[in-house]
């Protein structure tokens, strides 16, 4: 499956104020979530308040990172995506978190909306590419999967094998089928990060998770956030500014 990724570049916002207190922009980066560089920009009245915002975002992103991780187990979050994949075709439905349930449902919906171009049940195929990539990085063995390997794995990519029940239960009916959330996880997590900020009273912020950008701004801000859409073929060029 070939995926074209549009990278989003963050451009600066000219500072605004809320009419009473001068609001300043604070930028923070994280390197420990979703295997990418994550940037958070918030407007706050002082550095202390900005740290409260970004610390809460970091905590939320770490939680979602563990929930959506298909490669690692976590003692504090035992029923994550890896556990769901490990139990494929082997037992009863697994009770999962609200967030994991929501993103699985979104993934199934996206499959229908895109006529199968987005398929979160491609885990068996993506695992092969992941293994080859790691072998190249760790051992210097440069190669690509064979057509035979990919063809064999593609027999385990039926999205209908992923079943969602009541009370946040999920089940993968066929052994060998696995879910990979790489196509939807960062966008969902960025939206959740902005929700966290707004719940704390921060109404002007931008979250960028490896090119997945979500932002909000208060009506008092005189300028909008500007996000550049990168040309996927000429990566130094910007196709459009939104």
Image: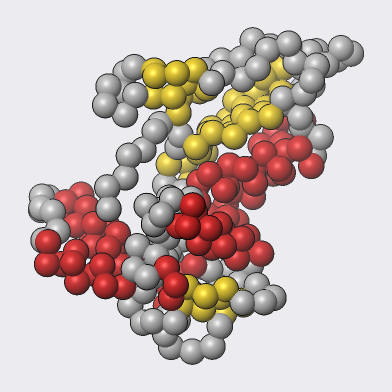
Instruction: Estimate the x, y position of residue 36 in percent, counting from the top left.
Output: 43, 41
Colour mapping used in the image: secondary structure
Instruction: Estimate the x, y position of residue 2 in percent, counting from the top left.
Output: 27, 47
Relative to 153, residue 35 above or below: above
Quarter of the image holding residue 150? Answer: bottom left
Q: Is residue 53 left or right of residue 110?
A: right
Quarter of the image holding residue 235? Answer: top left
Q: Residue at 26% x, 72% y: name it.
A: 155
Q: Residue at 40% x, 31% y: name it.
A: 7
* Relative depth, front residue between 30 and 83: 83
* Relative depth, front residue between 33 and 113: 113
In the rendered picture of this protein, how many numbered marks are placed on residues? Answer: 0
Q: Would residue 28 be seen by someone viewing this image from the given angle? A: yes
Instruction: Estimate the x, y position of residue 148 in percent, counting from the top left.
Output: 12, 67
Q: Residue at 56% x, 83% y: name it.
A: 93
* Relative depth, front residue between 105 and 92: 105
Relative to 165, residue 7 above or below: above
């Amino acid at each position: 499956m070939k995926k074209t990724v549009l990278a989003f570049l963050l451009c600066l916002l000219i500072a605004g104020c809320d009419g009473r207190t001068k609001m300043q922009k604070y930028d923070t980066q994280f390197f420990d979530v979703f295997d990418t560089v994550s940037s958070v920009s918030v407007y706050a009245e002082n550095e202390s308040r900005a740290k409260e915002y970004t610390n809460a975002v970091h905590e939320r992103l770490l939680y979602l990172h563990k929930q959506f991780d298909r490669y690692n187990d976590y003692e504090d979050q035992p029923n994550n995506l890896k556990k769901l994949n490990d139990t494929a075709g082997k037992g009863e439905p697994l009770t999962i978190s609200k967030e994991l349930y929501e993103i699985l449902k979104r993934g199934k919906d996206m499959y229908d909306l895109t006529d199968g171009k987005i398929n979160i049940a491609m885990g068996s195929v993506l695992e092969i590419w992941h293994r080859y990539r790691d072998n190249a990085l760790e051992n210097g063995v440069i190669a690509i999967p064979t057509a035979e390997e990919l063809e064999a794995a593609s027999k385990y990519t039926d999205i209908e094998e992923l079943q969602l029940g009541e009370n946040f239960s999920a089940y993968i009916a066929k052994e060998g089928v696995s879910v990979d959330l790489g196509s939807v996880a960062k966008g969902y997590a960025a939206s959740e990060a902005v929700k966290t900020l707004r719940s704390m009273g921060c109404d002007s912020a931008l979250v960028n998770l490896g090119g997945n950008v979500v932002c909000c701004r208060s009506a008092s801000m005189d300028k909008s956030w500007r996000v550049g859409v990168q040309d996927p073929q000429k990566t130094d060029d910007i196709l459009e500014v939104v």
